[in-house]
């Protein structure tokens, strides 16, 4: 391995540069694929200091962007889930609803609505196709974590923790 032939500080600098490069790739993969990919990125970002050296700092730092800049989806897209689950779009279930989300996460986004009784509420709308995709994506991540083992660490525990967090 070319990196291992380098010594001391030169090795450390090359390794950090490699982690910086690939952490940006991981961030782009999460952004482009959304859903569970963003959730896992957020989980990794939350591990600052807690993972020891199992997850390089560069990944934690790059993926932290996902914790406060998760991409939202168009209202019409998330409203499909409401129609499927409740038999009607959200506009028929409440007096009014804001089309622009006030917050967006990895698995859902939040819209302001007013009930028929006049109460202001926040409505969390799950992203479509999430149920079907999440399990398959987690299986893929678990397989990859077992095969890659960065730094000799089995990251299967990370996927298992994310799987438990999603089910809660």
Image (cartoon, grey):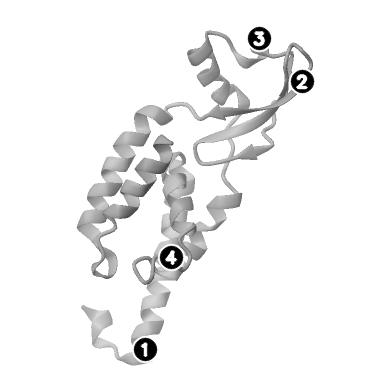
Name the mark nearer the viewer: 1 or 3.
3
Crowd class of label 2 (few under 14; some 14 to 19; many from 20; radius 10 Å): few
First in sequence: mark 1 vs mark 3: 1
Name the mark nearer the viewer: 3 or 2.
2
What is the secondary structure assignment of the residue under circle 3?
A: helix
Crowd class of label 4 (few under 14; some 14 to 19; many from 20; radius 10 Å): few
Question: Which numbered circle lies on residue 162?
Answer: none
The Cα atoms of the two marked residues, 3 and 4, are separated by 46 Å
The Cα atoms of the two marked residues, 1 and 2, are separated by 62 Å
Q: Are marks 1 and 3 in contact (CB under 8 Å)?
A: no
Q: Are marks 1 and 4 in contact (CB under 8 Å)?
A: no
From the viewer's perspective, tell me whether residue 117 is left or right of residue 74. Answer: right
What is the secondary structure assignment of the residue under circle 4?
A: loop
Place residue 88 in its image quadrant: top right
Q: Which residue is mark 3?
A: 92
Give x and y (percent) for residue 152: 23, 68
Task: Report the quarter where the N terminus lies.
Answer: bottom left
Nearest the camera: 119 or 53?
119
Question: Which numbered circle lies on residue 50?
Answer: 4
Q: Residue visible at 30% across and 36% down?
A: 136
Name the mark nearer the viewer: 3 or 4.
4
The Cα atoms of the two marked residues, 1 and 4, are separated by 27 Å
Q: Which residue is mark 2?
A: 119
The Cα atoms of the two marked residues, 3 and 2, are separated by 15 Å
The Cα atoms of the two marked residues, 1 and 3, are separated by 63 Å
In the rendered image, the vertical position of residue 72 relative to residue 85, given as above or below: below
- Which residue sits furthest right? 118
Q: Which residue is mark 1?
A: 10
Q: Are marks 1 and 2 in contact (CB under 8 Å)?
A: no
Name the mark nearer the viewer: 1 or 4.
4
What is the secondary structure assignment of the residue under circle 1?
A: helix
């Amino acid at each position: 391995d070319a990196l291992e032939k380098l010594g001391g500080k030169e090795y450390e600098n090359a390794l950090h540069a490699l982690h910086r490069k690939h952490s940006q790739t991981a961030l782009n993969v999460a952004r482009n694929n959304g859903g569970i990919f963003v959730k896992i990125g957020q989980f990794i970002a939350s591990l600052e200091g807690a993972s020891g050296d199992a997850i390089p700092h560069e990944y934690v730092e790059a993926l932290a962007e996902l914790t406060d800049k998760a991409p939202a989806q168009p209202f019409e897209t998330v409203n499909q889930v409401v129609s499927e689950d409740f038999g009607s779009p959200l506009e028929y279930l409440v007096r009014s609803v804001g089309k622009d989300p006030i917050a967006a996460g990895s698995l859902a986004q939040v819209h302001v609505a007013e009930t028929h009784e006049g109460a202001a509420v926040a409505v969390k709308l799950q992203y479509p196709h999430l149920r079907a995709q999440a399990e398959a994506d987690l299986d893929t991540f678990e397989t990859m974590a077992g095969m890659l083992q960065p730094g000799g660490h089995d990251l299967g525990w990370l996927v298992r923790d994310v799987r438990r967090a999603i089910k809660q």
